[in-house]
Image (cartoon, rainbow, N blue to C red):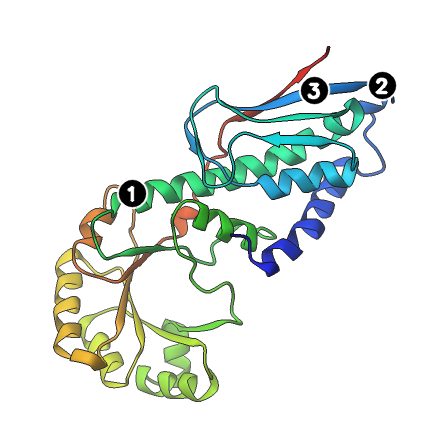
Amino acid sequence: MLSDETKASIGPGVAAALAEDVGAGDLTASLVDADAVVGATIIARESLVLCGEAWVNEVFRQLDENIIIDWYIGDGGRAEANDVICKIVGHARALLTGERTALNFLQTLSSTATITAAFTKAVEGTRTKVLDTRKTIPGLRLAQKYAVTCGGGVNHRVGLFDAILIKENHIKSAGSITAALQRAQEAGGEVLVEVEVENHGELLEALDAGAARILLDNFSIDELKEAVATNKSYGIVGAELEASGNVTLDTIREIAETGVDYISTGALTKNIRAADLSMLFRID
């Protein structure tokens, strides 16, 4: 479900995208009769998980409020090659002008939803949840995080403002994991405080310091298993464990089977290839 914050971001995001593409006006669309009305369909050219319905709706709303869009597959739904995603009817100029911007949003967000679905399917039957990261396309943070949920993934922190993740440089600046955690716990209030560790010794220090969540950075499978066993030995004062680093579709299942709570990967939002979609016009 779209959050209020994400909903609020759609209009300005679409306006910026249209301004980038249209500028002072669509010179090519102006060659078409202003009164011409056409129908169009958006068609999947490959198997995908759809995301971006609200962005497409907003593109055409901003260009012409009288455009009608009938969706056959909604966000989170799976489309196969040659499936019709939606049908659109409206003034030809507006449809021509909005075509690329609408498809840019739909292709990018569907790509994120599709790759997320593949990663979540790979860990089915385990206790592990797949998390996204802040490695998103600038300007599309909230949109891509929504797309991750459409693919069955779980959102990590949105930005630097809603959780604390203590990484190597923070630890060096503070002097130790214990010192960094203490400062974070004092300053963080109710937000999640997580610490990144790179070896078993740092894991022990983080556990002893009372870390609520620990990110195991680039641990091998054997190291992950050892970390899970050590964490269990702390009983109710143990932490949630998140694995990250070298996560691919080929490796994620084995990582999940170590018993970690979460696996985070930037691949959901940064290593993406635009989903193959096209918009075809019909002149009656």
Of labels 1 and 2, earlier in sequence is 2
Residue located at (31% from left, 72% from top) = 213
Q: Mark 2 points at which residue?
A: 31
Q: How crowded is mark 2: few (under 14 residues within 10 Å), some or many (20 or more)?
A: few
Query: Is residue 4 in view from this perspective?
Result: yes
Task: Single out the residue that lies furthest toward the top.
Answer: 284
Q: Name the residue under label 3.
A: 39
Which percent across, then down, holds residue 128?
26, 56
Would you place residue 27 above or below residue 6 in this image? above
Q: Residues within 10 Å of mark 3 (few under 14, many from 20)?
A: some
- In front of the other: label 1 or label 3? 3
Give the structural element (helix, strand or loop) at label 2.
helix
Residue located at (62% from left, 30% from top) = 70
- In front of the other: label 1 or label 2? 1
Residue located at (44% from left, 50% from top) = 149
Of labels 3 and 2, earlier in sequence is 2
Q: Are marks 3 and 2 in contact (CB under 8 Å)?
A: no
As shown in the figure, which amino acid type bears the numbered disc 1? Lys
Residue located at (50% from left, 63% from top) = 158
Which percent across, then down, holds residue 210?
28, 84
Q: How far apart are marks 1 and 3 (CA)?
A: 37 Å
- In front of the other: label 3 or label 2? 3
Horizontally, is 207 left or right of 97 in the view?
Answer: left
Q: How far apart are marks 1 and 2 (CA)?
A: 48 Å
As shown in the figure, which amino acid type bears the numbered disc 2? Leu
